[in-house]
């Protein structure tokens, strides 16, 4: 099961706006159809645009970003096996 962390800095706005952004992102994460078989940790760095973005767009952006991260973190199969240094 993937885990998510949310980061909303003070540059984003006052506390009311930051909390609203976090609430919207948490709700979008609950509704996003994410692949639960990949147990990665994700950190979402929120921007002020999250306040005005349509909710469906937030969900689509989360799914797309997670898919890119999973593809980027795929294990490299072209590397030789590590040597065993135990003697």
Image (tube, rainbow, N blue to C red):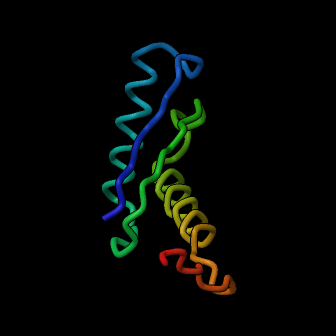
Vertical comparison of 17 with 39: above or below: above
> In front: 74, or 59?
74
Left or right of 47 in this view: 37: left
Give percent across and percent down for residue 77.
63, 86
Give percent across and percent down for residue 1.
30, 65
Picture residue at 59% right of the left edge, 79% below the top: 82
Vertical comparison of 42 with 70: above or below: above
Left or right of 30 in this view: 43: right
Vertical comparison of 74 with 56: above or below: below
Give percent across and percent down for residue 69.
57, 63
> In front: 52, or 23?
23
Which residue is the extreme one toward the top?
14
Picture residue at 36% right of the left edge, 61% below the top: 2
Picture residue at 54% right of the left edge, 75% below the top: 85
Q: How many marks?
A: 0
Vertical comparison of 36 with 79: above or below: above
Give percent across and percent down for residue 51.
51, 33
Q: Quadrant of residue 70?
A: bottom right
> In front: 61, or 56?
61
Which residue is the extreme one toward the right?
78
> In front: 5, or 57?
5
Picture residue at 54% right of the left edge, 38% below the top: 45
């Amino acid at each position: 099961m993937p885990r998510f962390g949310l980061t909303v800095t003070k540059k984003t706005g006052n506390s009311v706006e930051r909390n609203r952004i976090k609430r919207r992102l948490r709700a979008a994460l609950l509704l996003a159809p994410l692949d639960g078989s990949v147990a990665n940790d994700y950190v979402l760095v929120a921007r002020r645009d999250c306040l005005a973005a349509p909710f469906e767009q937030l969900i689509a952006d989360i799914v797309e970003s997670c898919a890119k991260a999973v593809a980027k973190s795929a294990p490299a199969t072209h590397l030789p096996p590590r040597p065993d240094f135990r003697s």
